[in-house]
Image (cartoon, rainbow, N blue to C red):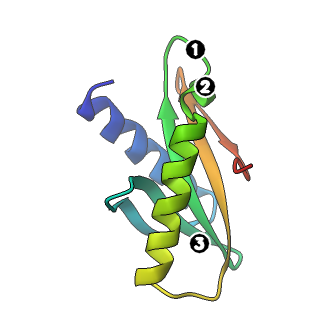
Amino acid sequence: MSLKIGQEAEEKASLYLQRNGYTIFERNFHSKFGEIDIIALKEGVLHFFEVKFSQKYDPIVRITPSKMKKIIMTINYYFLLHPMQYDYQIDAILIKNEQIEIIKNISY
């Protein structure tokens, strides 16, 4: 997937979240471990979103155990830099053929 397509998917996801009551804290948080696409707050819960896009198949298959490990390490680093007292969860935003779906609590 090209960088431009990825950025467009993240923009669509951000707008979708804002329309659904989320407050965007940060986009594209980078660490040496990986990246969190979107960090947003809703109803006192901090959500770490992984955005995946595909036109051909279910984008959830692109969130592998290796990717989850990187996401979790990046979240831990985020909390070192930004100590907070929020509950949090890891969610996915899947975009396929203009359909947007949130899958909550994807961690295992």
Quarter-wise, where is residue 27 in the image? bottom left
Residue 99, given in percent of the width and then of the height, sits at 59, 29
Which residue is pictured at 31% across the width and 41% down the height?
7
Quarter-wise, where is residue 63 in the image? top right
Label 3 crowd (10 A; few <14 / some 14-19 / many >=20):
many
Front position in the image: 38 or 77:
77
Residue 88, given in percent of the width and then of the height, sits at 67, 70
Front position in the image: 89 or 93:
89
Which residue in the rendered view is the most extreme toward the top? 56
Mark 2 vs mark 1: give the one in front: 2
Q: Which label is found at residue 41?
A: 3
Which residue is pictured at 70% across the width and 47% down the height?
106
Do the numbered discs 3 and 1 sit on residues whose CB atoms are within 8 Å?
no
Number of numbered markers: 3
Residue at mark 2 to residue at mark 1: CA–CA distance: 8 Å
Do the numbered discs 2 and 1 sit on residues whose CB atoms are within 8 Å?
yes
Residue at mark 3 to residue at mark 1: CA–CA distance: 29 Å
Task: Give the mark, 3 or 1, whose residue is nearer the N terminus.
Answer: 3
Q: Find disc 1 in the rendering and name its residue.
A: 57
Q: Secondary structure at mark 1?
A: loop
Which residue is pictured at 40% across the width and 67% down the height?
26
Q: Secondary structure at mark 2?
A: helix
The three-letter amino acid code for the residue at tag 2 is Val
The three-letter amino acid code for the residue at tag 1 is Tyr
Left or right placement of residue 31 versus residue 93 in this view: left
Task: Give the mark, 2 or 3, whose residue is nearer the N terminus.
Answer: 3
Residue 97, given in percent of the width and then of the height, sits at 53, 20
Q: Secondary structure at mark 3?
A: strand
Q: Find disc 2 in the rendering and name its residue.
A: 61
Label 2 crowd (10 A; few <14 / some 14-19 / many >=20):
few
Which residue is pictured at 51% across the width and 88% down the height?
83
